[in-house]
Image (cartoon, rainbow, N blue to C red):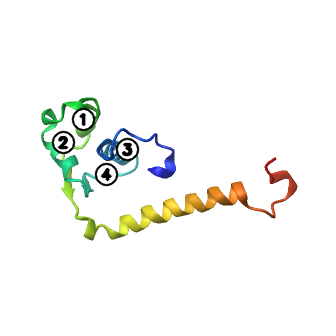
Amino acid sequence: MGTRNIIRRESALHSEVEALRWAMENMLQHSTCQSFGTDCKELIAMIKEPHVWPSFATELERIDTLQICFPDFKITYVPRAQNHISDFLAKTARSFYRELYFTVLFGSGYPDHLKFE
């Protein structure tokens, strides 16, 4: 999500909720996926018992509304040690974005019509 210009959230847990919402919305448009995985145990606890997390009430209401569209919704815990493929993809995306960003700002050898003044 970092490469999609998502606004930084109040906490890492807020970002986890936002990432789940984003994934659910995208699955509605592009897939029949009903199962989601996370390495955040707190996120799973929030989904199972949202009333225990009143400071996340607005975000969890959005997730609850989306769950209506997923009759077989499941969210499972994936330990970080087993999550190496998605971690690799995320790190690759971040490094690609960073290299591209610095190339554009500091690179040389561009034709005159592409140079920044």
Looking at the image, tell me whether mark 3 or mark 2 is earlier in sequence order.
3
Location of mark 1 (residue): 60
The residues bearing labels 4 and 2 have C-alpha atoms spaced at a distance of 23 Å
Q: In the rendering, which numbered label is found on residue 22?
A: 3
The residues bearing labels 3 and 2 have C-alpha atoms spaced at a distance of 16 Å
SS for dot 4: loop
SS for dot 3: helix
SS for dot 2: helix
The residues bearing labels 4 and 1 have C-alpha atoms spaced at a distance of 22 Å
Horizontal relation, residue 63 to residue 90: left or right: left
Which of the two marks, 4 or 3, is nearer to us in this view?
A: 3
Depth check: 100 or 102 in front?
A: 102
The residues bearing labels 2 and 1 have C-alpha atoms spaced at a distance of 8 Å
Looking at the image, tell me whether mark 4 or mark 3 is earlier in sequence order.
3
Amino acid on which the number 3 mark rests in the picture: Trp
Q: In the rendering, which numbered label is found on residue 32?
A: 4
Location of mark 2 (residue): 46
